[in-house]
Image (spheres, rainbow, N blue to C red):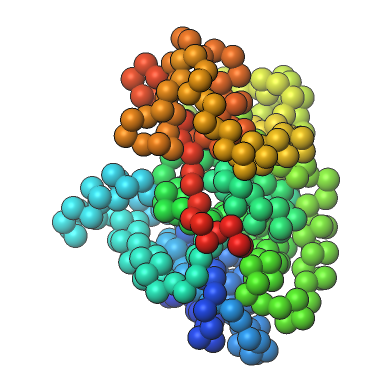
């Protein structure tokens, strides 16, 4: 017997766990890309075990499914990427459109925004956002985050490698919406699509976060097998890397990634990475390959990253604690945006030496052109996040 399988039905709220005690809210999304159901499965497993064990919990867990229509069709998206378009001006324009003009992802985003607003409005403590993903390549799990000290601290607690700088290359991810509100947020890439290991990795990160945030006691869950699972998956991947290049592609480019690349794979300058209708793409320097594209939909062919040494992490932490950003305006060609104290403007004709590196050390990462100037924006966490 032949035929097409019926679409699988998903509900917006995967579930929640709340015993009425004040504390942090762990807000989880899975399946923002419809070909990545592992996040939904991981959240379901955690909630099912909580239901079975009935532990006390400080605060609450709220888990949401992202792109319901795309999940049911097992496609990354139907009309557009739901993990784009979370900038305030884009959201405002979407909200002004008539219902008949909305794409399927516009409707999903509207519903998610209502859910996010409800969670933030009813929170009894700090909110921590975790967006669960998988990728089309094998390799170590990793985290993406807005570069604040609070996000780094929470991210490092998981033991999972961290990618810095991706917010400078991808505009409008949901992490940006939360970062603009000072809410701590992590995106977790668990592993390859449709891999049981990826589901286990995502589940392990969730259990570790629940203990780190003080929502569950250490005795309420045995973290040892979860930590062992993550160590096996991580292998020798570097603990922190920084994105230095994004290969943007379009559907008619004829992009073809060379087979066999995995996340964090070390490549030497000159190695062939991919081809398209215009020719070859080779590594411009020694680096790590991240998120090589082995699926039909998507506009990111691959990313290139370099390892960040521990000294620079230590220096960044102390410079930010000492509020050293005040010295930036003493440097030639740099001034503060008069309309936003957390944005610095740099004239590249005057400020030529190590400008990007200095801004990154001090937490100014969101870079965009502003006429003849470059604008660097700093994410500011809420005061309550410092206790997480």
Q: Residue at 77%, 68% (x, y): give it.
A: 226
Residue 300 appears in the rendering: no
At which x and y percent is residue 305? Answer: 66, 33
Q: Quadrant of the C terminus?
A: bottom right
Q: Reply above or below: 84 against 113.
A: above
At which x and y percent is residue 22? Answer: 52, 79
Q: Residue at 60%, 52% (x, y): give it.
A: 150
Q: Nearer the viewer, residue 277 or 239?
A: 239
Q: Residue at 52%, 34% (x, y): give it.
A: 364
At which x and y percent is residue 248? Answer: 50, 32
Q: Reply above or below: 332 against 190.
A: above
Q: Nearer the viewer, residue 343 or 206?
A: 343
Count the marks: 0
Q: Reply above or below: 289 against 224.
A: above
Q: Which residue ends up furthest to the top in the rendered image?
A: 349
Q: Quadrant of residue 73?
A: bottom left
Q: Quadrant of residue 327?
A: top right
Q: Nearer the viewer, residue 221 or 322?
A: 322
Q: Is residue 240 left or right of residue 14?
A: right
At which x and y percent is residue 60? Answer: 53, 77
Q: Nearer the viewer, residue 72 or 32?
A: 32
Residue 238 appears in the rendering: yes
Q: Residue at 78%, 52% (x, y): give it.
A: 234
């Amino acid at each position: 017997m032949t035929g097409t399988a019926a679409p699988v039905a998903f509900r917006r709220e995967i579930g929640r766990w709340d015993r009425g005690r004040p504390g942090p809210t762990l807000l989880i999304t899975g399946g923002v890309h419809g070909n990545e159901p592992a996040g939904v499965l991981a959240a379901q497993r955690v909630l099912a075990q909580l239901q079975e064990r009935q532990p006390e919990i400080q605060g609450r867990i709220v888990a949401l499914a992202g792109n319901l229509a795309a999940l049911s069709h097992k496609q990354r998206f139907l009309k557009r990427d739901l993990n784009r378009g979370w900038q305030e001006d884009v959201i405002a324009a979407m909200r002004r459109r008539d219902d008949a003009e909305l794409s399927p992802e516009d409707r999903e985003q509207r519903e998610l925004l209502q859910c996010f607003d409800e969670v933030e409005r009813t929170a009894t403590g700090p909110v921590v956002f975790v967006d669960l993903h998988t990728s089309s390549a094998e390799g170590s799990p990793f985290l993406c985050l807005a570069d604040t000290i609070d996000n780094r601290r929470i991210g490092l607690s998981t033991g999972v490698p961290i990618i810095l700088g991706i917010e400078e290359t991808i505009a409008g991810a949901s992490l940006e919406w939360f970062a603009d509100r000072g809410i701590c947020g992590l995106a977790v890439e668990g592993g390859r699509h449709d891999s049981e290991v990826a589901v286990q990795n995502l589940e392990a990160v969730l259990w570790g976060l629940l203990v780190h945030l003080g929502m569950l006691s250490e005795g309420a869950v045995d973290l040892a097998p979860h930590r062992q699972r993550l160590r096996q998956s991580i292998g020798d991947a570097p603990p922190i890397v920084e994105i230095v290049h994004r290969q943007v592609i379009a559907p008619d480019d004829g992009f073809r990634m060379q087979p066999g690349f995995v996340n964090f794979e070390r490549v030497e300058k000159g190695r062939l990475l991919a081809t398209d209708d215009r020719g070859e793409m080779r590594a411009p320097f020694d680096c790590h390959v991240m998120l090589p594209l082995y699926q039909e939909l998507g506009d990111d062919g691959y990313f290139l990253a370099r390892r960040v040494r521990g000294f620079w992490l230590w220096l960044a932490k102390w410079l930010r604690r000492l509020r050293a950003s005040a010295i930036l305006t003493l440097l030639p060609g740099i001034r503060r945006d008069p309309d936003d104290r957390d944005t610095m403007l740099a004239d590249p004709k005057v400020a030529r030496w190590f400008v990007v590196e200095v801004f990154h050390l001090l937490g100014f990462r969101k870079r965009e052109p502003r006429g003849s100037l470059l604008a660097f924006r700093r994410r500011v966490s809420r005061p309550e996040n410092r206790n997480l």
